[in-house]
Amino acid sequence: MSDVGQGITGSLRRLQSAYSFDPADIDAVMIGTTHFINALVEAERLAPTAAIRLGLPATGGLPPFVGWPARITEALHALPYMCHGGHEFDGREISPIDPDEIRRAAQDAVAKGARSFAISSVFSPVNSEFEQRAAEIINAEFPELPVSLSNEIGRVGLLERENATIINAALRELSADVCSSLDQSLVALNIHAPLFLSQNDGTLMDVDFARKYPVATFASGPTNSMRGAAYLSGLKDCIVVDVGGTTTDVGVLQSGFPREAATEIEVAGIRTNFRMPDVLSVGLGGGSRIRFDNGVTVGPDSVGYRVTEEALVFGGNTLTATDIMVAAGDAEIGDPGLVSHLDPSMVKAAKVEIYRRIAETVDRMRTSSDLVPVVAVGGGAFLVPEQMACASDVARPGHSGVANAIGAAIAQVGGEVDRIFAIPAGKREEVLDQAREEAISKAIAAGAKASTVQIVEIDELPLAYLPGNASRVRVKAVGDLPASK
């Protein structure tokens, strides 16, 4: 649905008609949306964006938007600019910033139609001074236009961080429209509780924060399911298998939160490095088509959400994975009599292939030879085998079909710091304390109640290839939602 607010309104009205409730009793509204990543993938509703990089005379060989799919650069009317500035990893200037140069670039971009700016500077996660100054210059010239800064969005790695920032900038207009639509839909239903959106790491951010950082919602679907699985199963460390109509998403929970990807993530053909969960997706779901033309094949094409219309057990004409499991007696969905004619040997062969692919995907997500507990959730959880050679146990908690919604409802508000610090001799604890305070401040800025914020994760990786006793420090803080009543 193109109007996400209309979809929310319709869903809540149907819920209220089925289970009467007083809107005044709602303490908070949490929403997980794929609206923004869909816009990027479909190359629609992207604002004309200017990317200003501060780094000359370095970095000139690879300008902004390098390696981007042509259809996306055309959709956002890509406008690349390279200016002087940037820092070395230890904070030393590459070259001084030139305010007039930045001002001319911004004026030229607006003259060519730019409605959003993305600013990236070499090693800005170490020293963000030049990005902040460039933003001030642009805001003074064009106060009505949004500016996204790479040090607030991506991690160390210039091109990937710059790409993430450009994506964020291109989505700022859409984010403002969507968040306003969500606000209006709640008001129309007489719901005056605070609104939060799910982030990629399984935590929440308030709607004002979401307006500025729409890329933080990109992987909220799988992360909500994983957090919901942890809540329903009571397991904090496990592998979660989330089976939908088209795909199976497999991720790892560590201390109750999704394990994050350690490498660059490709989104819509663009390399980025912002926070994303480590999820492996395969084209296998309840609506996956089953064929026996040359052996047995399962998917990757699927009838998707039309499974209740096209699957055999619902009177359709397409043989799906759901039909196989019903025929095998492992699922009670639709009319079993409509698949009673299937050859038992074919049913068995298809079931074996489904089980093999899921077990293989789970095995690929393990980081050691130890057996791991597995939690199966999602509407297609019946596709997950009862036993797997790589699993110590396979749990199927109650209400697993709505794990995604539960994950959004129970989430906390989070903030993270992930950057390189030069650690002077004897100053390690001071540097770590600084990182902790920054993470706590980010969690509070995202909407967490200050008195509840705590540090849940600290990673420190010494970088032996850099001088100056440098370390990559990552700190994650989470806190509870503020009470609305």
Image (cartoon, helix red, strand yellow):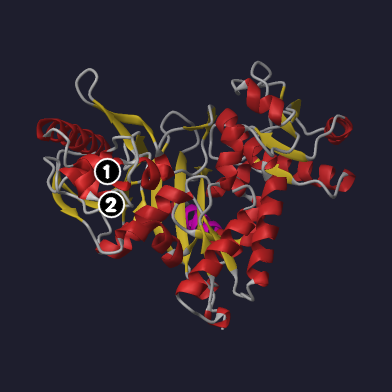
Mark 1 sits on what residue?
Answer: 322
| 10 Å crowding of disc 2: few (<14), some (14-19), many (20+) | some
Question: Which residue is pictured at 76% across the width and 26% down the height?
Answer: 81
Q: For mark 2, what is the residue?
A: 334
Residue 209 image offset from top left, x and y in percent: 63, 57
Q: Amino acid at mark 1?
A: Thr
Q: Is residue 195 above or below residue 200?
A: below
The residue under the point 67% across, 71% down is 187
Residue 440 visible in the current orientation: no
Position of 252 compared to 161: left or right?
left
- Amino acid under disc 2: Gly
Q: Is residue 207 above or below residue 80?
A: below
Q: Determine the CA span between mark 1 and mark 2.
A: 9 Å
> In the image, residue 79 lies at what x, y percent?
76, 27
| Residue at point 27%, 43% (across, down) | 322
| Disc nearer the start of the sequence (1/2) | 1
Question: Which residue is pictured at 86% across the width and 29% down the height?
Answer: 112
Please state the extent of the stretch shown in magenta in the rendering: 429-440
Marks 1/2 in contact by CB < 8 Å: the verdict is yes
Q: Residue 430 in magenta? A: yes
Toward the viewer: 74 or 275?
A: 74
